[in-house]
Image: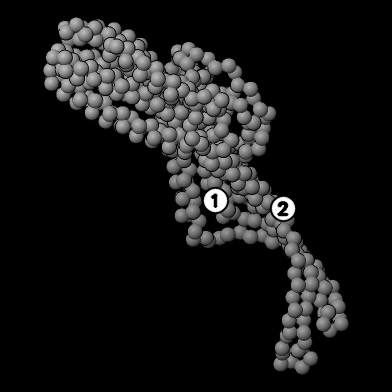
Amino acid sequence: MSVLKVFRLGALALALGLTPTLSHAESLADAMAYAYANNPSLASSFLTVRSAQQGIRSAEGARLPTIGGEASVGYTWSDVPGRTAPNDSLGLSYSQTLFDSSTDDAILRAQAEYDAAVQGARNVEQNVLLSVAQAYVNVVTNRRIVDIRQENIGFVRAQLQSARDRLELGEGTQLDVAQAQASLAQAEAAYQGAINNLRQAEANYVRWVGHEPRGLSASYRFGNLLPGSLDSAIAAATTNHPALLASAAQIRAAQHGYNETVAGFGPTISFTGQAGLGGFSTNTIASQASVSLRLSVPIFVPARDPAVERANIGQIQTQVEGIATRDQITEAVRQGWAGIQATTAQIESATAAVAASRLALQAVIDQNEVGQATTLDVLNARASLLNAEEALASAQAQRAIASYSLIAATGALSAANLGLPVQLRGADGTVAEPVRVPEAPADVWGNLR
């Protein structure tokens, strides 16, 4: 049996042994859907939105009255005869701020903070889904590389056995055997390195998805989410990206916070009222009531100037951070677009290299069988094929990741846009829409532009 036939049979057995059952298959959409429903980072972002909702209610509460109940029991001593007696009272109090300069800005600040939390939750959703996509693709790619390197071990072992057989027949040399043994050691070391990389990729998968990877496939669906040009991608990103919208809301919150700080040192008008009963211990129960209108005008407050300056610095800082966020998003768009273009060319080149390397390997094997090529020639040809196959797998993975990264950079990577089979949630985590049925998967690379 020729070395090539042994190699083919070994590869077939490996493929049959490692093919997952279809009943446990998990598509990328399934993995994203599971993470969308269970990821703790996303759940935490929902809680942040709910907290911001309560911030609005708290700010609006400054306009509402405060009502309280009071009760007291005591005894009064005096050196004036007849003035020593117990005293007690029971009553209600009412207070309300009729006018101040800061409540309106406090409410507007809370509303802007809520908007920032909502957009922040959208951005967390994008980041989680992108991380899931990266983890999924990395596991698929590392498993493919493990398969390639294990197939290579089978090939080199068959080549080593062939060299030993030829040596026993007097047709080969000890050098051929030694070279095959060295290649086998290198192949086994490379295989163990691939196993280690796969374990790391699987650990990252568990972190983002929430369970062990099972039945993954290199079938990725982008729909119509990829932009048609770099300019349209940048335009979409600077208009719709949730991180940029969150930055804009944070800028508004800082501006209202500054106005609130300045207005907090202005005049206030408040109304208070009290009503109650007293004299229970002396059986001389009497009712009493009082009302008052109070005007407060700060004249000198040492904390005013540093508080105002601090609020102003915070306002400027959020604007600078917003510019930095915009630049980062634009950079991500350009990198994603360039990554797709570069990896597309790499895939074409690697595909051609794999085809050529396979033909070259077959030719060298045929020459080796008739004594026109050495064992080293065969091993070198096999190494070239191995490198070409790994380069192709890597380029395909990089293009998939670049595609999802570009979609995320434009702000379009969401469960709704991807059509994930989940119950969509609002910004606070409440169920917003019924289960969606995902579209039929497109060709793995057919939607790339």
- Dot 1 amino acid type: Thr
Near mark 2 (Cα within 10 A), the count class, few <14, some 14-19 or many ≥20, is few
- Taking depth in this image into account, of 63 and 209 the one nearest to the observer is 209
Quarter occupied by residue 335: top left
Q: Which residue is at a point 32% across and 24% down the rendered structure image?
A: 149
Q: Tell me how the rendering is colored.
A: one colour
Mark 1 vs mark 2, foreground winner is 2
Left/right placement of residue 256 relative to residue 365 reads: right
Disc 1 secondary structure class: helix
* Residue 191 sits above or below residue 395 on the image: below
Q: Which residue lies furthest to the front in this view?
A: 169
Give the Cα separation between the discs numbered 1 and 2: 20 Å
- Dot 2 amino acid type: Leu
Q: Name the residue under label 2.
A: 64
- Residue 388: x %, y % from top left: 30, 16
Left/right placement of residue 2 relative to residue 317 reads: left
Query: Is residue 409 at all visible to an observer of this figure?
Result: no
- Residue 441: x %, y % from top left: 54, 17
- Residue 404: x %, y % from top left: 46, 24
Ranked by sequence position, the earlier of labels 1 and 2 is 2
Q: Which residue is at a point 63% across and 22% down the rendered structure image?
A: 437
Q: Mark 1 points at which residue?
A: 261
* Residue 449 sits above or below residue 19 on the image: above
